[in-house]
Image: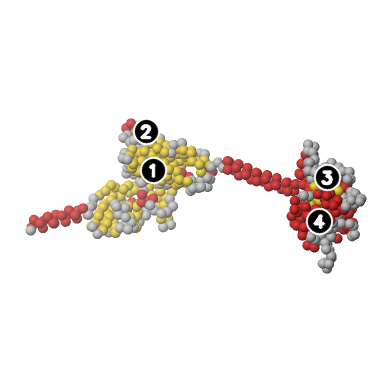
Amino acid sequence: MAASWALLMAAGAALAAAHDHHGETDTYRVSIGHLFLLRCLSADNHANVTWSRGGGDPSLPPGMEVREGLLWFLPVQMSHDGVYTCEKRDPPGALRATFGVSVSRGKCPDPPEDKSLSLEVPGSLSCKQKEIFHLKSTRNVRWMKDCRPMEGGGHVTVDHGGLMRLSAASRGDSGNYTCLVDVSVDGRTYTAARSIRVTVDKGVEGTLAVKPEVVYPQHKVLVVQEGARVELECLASIGFSEDPETSMYWTVNETDTDGHEELHDSWKFVHRRGRVFGESTLSISNVRRHFLNVPIFCWVLNPGGSHKGDVWLQEADHRALYTAVALGLSSSLALVLLFAVLVFFRVDLVLAHRKLLRTFSKRALDGKLYDAYVSFLPPDGPGSAEAASLALGLLPEELEEQHGYSLYIPGRDDCPGEAVHDAVAATVRRCRRLIIIISPEANPPSDGRTEPRLCYEQKVGLHDALTSNDPRVILVEVGGPVDYSRLPESLRYVRRRQGALRWRSTRGASRSFWKSLRYHMPSVPSGGRPAAI
């Protein structure tokens, strides 16, 4: 029983020791006037952490306070030099840790870390002020060498995370470097500082690091739209382990991405088939004109060397599309213009074509004797008198004398003694066109007691035109508008189907009338009026 109790007590003591660790860690080196934050090992911001000075005094010197488990020095004073202990309590037990803080009066703190860089090999220095960079406040990062501002040089760049890169380390780069970070706390600006001692004294052959290599991109061309969002991916082979000295970054036209608000880059280690790779992404929120057709490099570097891959952004070539659209619009416009020309100048084009054909064409052997039969009512009113004048005077003068058509005009071409109805019907059927001249006098009185007035040849011609479309009818209105609603259905049908020409004696109107009349006449005239038969 006693042995069992002793064994239980020993297990309890071992468990307590596992959860009650204490001991002094590395001393933090700071200088007066700077902001400094101290975290209790792995405690998060919501852990129950208490701080004390010297391991027992719970009171802290002026200018120090605890915020979310962190010990704040606002700012560091000479009186803050000493040893501080933190204790974190949680259900499994308690965790205690002790830290030393060494305060110097110099402008830059003493370097707590030494780092060696390889001669003529790219290298990088990390600011390593993790707690400061986690503060959500505006900050400005800058580096000093031997506590003097660094002169701007093409071989040194600093990113937004405070990482300083040297494109090729030289012996002159040896010295003490201090990373300064300006932050705003409670409306007041503070500066945090950390130093590192750098020695450049060996070449690549003295290191065990594997030279990294960018797998992709390599000479890649990406077609983009100006103003679009683009993400560029980069994969680099690192070796067989995660080297903390490895870094990846991007440059655009040999300038750092921090100089462009549209650019944001990030990277991480990934493991594939037993090897370690670095994956980096460059996010371009808005492709600007100055991002196009310039080299965009993805860099990877570690103590073993550096390597880069390039990608080029080219604007999408819309010339082929614009050319196709322009040709399409031009073709459409040309078709519209051609259609408009055909519509508005149809009569002139047809007449010009006929004039050209007359040189090579002969009269068709269709058995027709006349080009047109001219029908009009006897003159018993102003409109009828104008119709007779047009039929007996103007039509022969224009069509026969000027253009060689042959017309049959009643009252001029009838033969005395022949049977009127039989002769009229035969003559109409031997004409290619039937020109019916209508005036308002053709309308019957509105009392309905008088039938509409039509000549016999008009009745015969309309009957043949409606049944066999031979001869074709040409309606000509003279003396004013004609009310077709009081005329026979055959005339109304012809009027609806093909319209009617309207004679006006004015110069411009008469010229258009003659063109339209010739357009409806046969394309090749017979060549003159035949002798009476």
Mark 1 or mark 4, earlier in chain: 1
Q: Name the residue under label 1.
A: 279
Q: How far across and down, in percent of the image, does residue 289 sit? A: 54, 43
Q: What residue type is labelled 3?
A: Leu
Left or right of 182, for residue 57: left
Badge number at residue 459:
4
Mark 3 or mark 1, earlier in chain: 1
Note whether 379 is above or below 301 in the view shown: below
Quarter in which the C terminus is drawn: top right
What residue is shown at x 60% (from left), y 42% (from top)? 324
Task: Determine crowd level at label 2: few under 14, some 14-19, many 20+ residues with C-alpha closer than 10 A.
Answer: many
Q: What residue type is labelled 1?
A: Glu
Task: Determine crowd level at label 3: few under 14, some 14-19, many 20+ residues with C-alpha closer than 10 A.
Answer: some
Under tag 1, what secondary structure?
strand
Mark 2 or mark 1, earlier in chain: 2
Mark 3 vs 2: CB contact within 8 A: no
The quarter of the picture where residue 213 lies is top left
Mark 3 or mark 2, earlier in chain: 2
Under tag 2, what secondary structure?
loop
Under tag 4, what secondary structure?
helix
Q: Name the residue under label 3.
A: 369
Q: Mark 2 points at which residue?
A: 119
Mark 3 or mark 4, earlier in chain: 3
Q: What residue type is labelled 4?
A: Lys
